[in-house]
Image: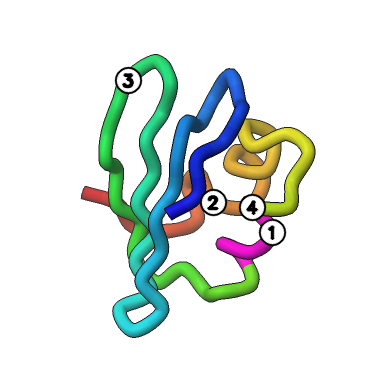
């Protein structure tokens, strides 16, 4: 599970079998689970220069969460 040096997201975990992306936010903690997330979205998050901007553009309000 990758840990990030980000002001928005501290770490992420991805399960490719269930397509669940779990995120831990620096302010609110976590995990917050996002469902139906394709592998390339997780890979993009890991490569993104700004984790928060990537999350807002490609993940937030696009995938179901609990």
Residue lying at the far bottom in this picture: please name it: 17
As measured in the structure, the alpha-carbon distance from the residue carrying label 1 to the one carrying label 4 is: 5 Å
Secondary structure of the residue carrying tag 2 is helix
Q: Is residue 19 above or below residue 26?
A: below
Q: Which of marks 2 and 1 is in front?
A: 1
Does residue 45 appear left or right of residue 17 in this picture? right
Pick the front one: 62 or 33? 33
Pick the front one: 65 or 6? 6
Q: Is the magenta stretch mostly helix, strand or loop?
A: helix
Secondary structure of the residue carrying tag 3 is loop
> Across the whole image, how many numbered discs are drawn on residues?
4
The residue identified by callout 1 is: 44
Secondary structure of the residue carrying tag 1 is helix
Q: Give the range drawn in magenta.
A: 41-45
Which callout, 3 or 1, points at the residue further toward the start of the chain?
A: 3
Q: Does the magenta stretch include residue 42?
A: yes
Question: CB under 8 Å between callouts 1 and 4?
Answer: yes
Please give the label number shown on residue 28. Answer: 3
At x 46%, y 68%, the residue is 37
Please give the label number shown on residue 13. Answer: none
Q: Quadrant of residue 11?
A: top left
Q: Quadrant of residue 49?
A: top right
Category of crowding for the residue at label 4, using alpha-carbon neighbours closer than 10 angstroms: few (below 14), some (14–19), many (at least 20) = some
Question: CB under 8 Å between callouts 3 and 1?
Answer: no
Category of crowding for the residue at label 3, using alpha-carbon neighbours closer than 10 angstroms: few (below 14), some (14–19), many (at least 20) = few
Which callout, 4 or 3, points at the residue further toward the start of the chain?
A: 3
The residue identified by callout 4 is: 46
As measured in the structure, the alpha-carbon distance from the residue carrying label 3 to the one carrying label 1 is: 22 Å
Q: In this view, does 45 lie above or below 23?
A: below
Quarter of the image where the N terminus is located: bottom left
As measured in the structure, the alpha-carbon distance from the residue carrying label 2 to the one carrying label 1 is: 11 Å
At x 39%, y 15%, the residue is 27
């Amino acid at each position: 599970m990758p840990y990030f040096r980000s002001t928005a997201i501290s770490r992420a975990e991805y399960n490719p079998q269930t397509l669940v992306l779990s995120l831990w936010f620096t302010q609110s903690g976590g995990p917050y689970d996002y469902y139906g997330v394709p592998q390339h979205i997780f890979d993009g998050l890991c490569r993104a220069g700004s984790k928060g901007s990537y999350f807002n553009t490609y993940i937030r309000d696009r995938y179901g969460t609990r």
